[in-house]
Image (cartoon, helix red, strand yellow):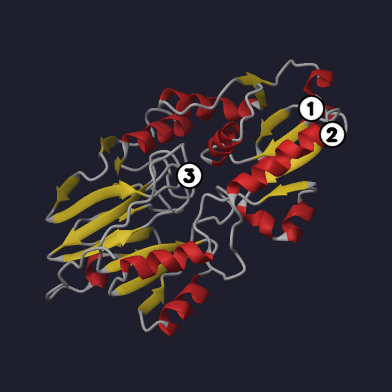
Amino acid sequence: MPETIRSWGMVYPSEILRPTEAGLYCPPGDFYVDPVRPVDRAVITHGHSDHARAGHGHVLATAETLAIMGERYGEDFAGQVQPAAFGQTVSHKGVDIALHPAGHVLGSAQAAIGFQGCRLVVSGDYKRRADATCRPFEPVPCDVFITEATFGLPVFRHPEDSGEVRKLLQSLVTFPDRPHLLGAYALGKAQRVLSLIRAQGYHDAIYFHGAMARLNALYQAHGIDLGTLVPVSGVDADELNGKIILVPPSALADRWSRRMTNPVTAFASGWMRVRARARQRSVSLPMIISDHADWDELTATIDELHPEEIWVTHGREDALVHWAHSKGMAAQPLSIVGYDDDADE
């Protein structure tokens, strides 16, 4: 159980952070956390496009997240940028801002917002499982925990990652004459799956679609070992039999993949728990690997922190709010529009 921090005095949490059409806004500090449209001043939790947008006047984020935004949007993606190390406190207009690891993707952070003795923590997207490609989630004592709920239903209980990867490796043995297309989102999921594959002892070259090149290189530049990676462009189709080809999800069923001969189509996503989604994408080898906390991890995190209040955002808000109420906790949905459940899964 984390240490207890002192409760707020005359200030109410809703005076420190409140949902607006532009996103979660801090009136005393005059800034937004993960705004859904360009604003004068933003705190960005991580680099996925539904949280990190170009066009802000000033952006505070981890150095890794700023590097990801620069790679995706160009170096002039914001008027000014301010890198912050994990645990560093930045004060602005009397508001203390500190970023803490979220365990979601490289550079991902929770934003701890403190004002007049009250601390609110915005989780951003997070997971609690081990991931060699990013810093693990760090529980932060707080009065109000603002949690995501992408997989906030009891049906979403992710299996062990290693077992999902073994399904892919076994398929390579079973079908050595077929290429294996592995769909994964370009930021975070792709690199994590590569790391998981390597951890299972697979050290052959893995081929990759051109859309994966820049972010793979960025991870490698930050010291993340992804093993031997080879661009698939120009490689004869017959040479890809029995090999893994990492591709963006959109490539699994488009014209690009049709040059492959009878491929096995795999897709790494928490949504592969839903069989209808696998069928919609014509996925023959669904791999339930998520970069978000599942139901058990969401509820265990709330139990561990035991904040005075829980605010739930982007995802299955109502179920998690109901669970919190059943435990005697104060909870409410924020219902902020503009975050995409599928953006990084």
Read off the residue under disc 3: 48
Please tell me which residue is depicted at 66% across the width and 27% down the height of the picture.
Answer: 209
Please tell me which residue is depicted at 70% across the width and 61% down the height of the picture.
Answer: 274
SS category of the residue bearing label 1: loop
Question: Do residues under tags 2 and 1 come within 8 Å of each other at their CB atoms?
Answer: yes
- Image quadrant in which you'd find residue 228: top right
Amino acid on which the number 1 mark rests in the picture: Gly
- Per the rendering, the mark at residue 175 is 2
* C-alpha gap between disc 2 and disc 1: 7 Å
Q: Badge 3, how many Cα within 10 Å: few under 14, some, many 20+?
A: many
**Labels 1, 3: front one:** 1
Image: 213 above or below 313: above
Amino acid on which the number 2 mark rests in the picture: Phe
| Image spot of residue 111 (x, y percent) | 30, 53
Amino acid on which the number 3 mark rests in the picture: His
Can residue 268 be seen from the camera position used here? Answer: no
- Per the rendering, the mark at residue 242 is 1
- Image quadrant in which you'd find residue 262: top right
* C-alpha gap between disc 2 and disc 3: 34 Å
| Image spot of residue 320 (x, y percent) | 48, 73
Tell which circle, 2 or 1, labels the residue nearer the N-terminal end. 2
Which quarter of the rendering shows the N terminus? Answer: bottom left
Tell which circle, 2 or 3, labels the residue nearer the N-terminal end. 3
Q: Is residue 333 left or right of residue 247?
A: left
Q: Is residue 29 left or right of residue 212?
A: left
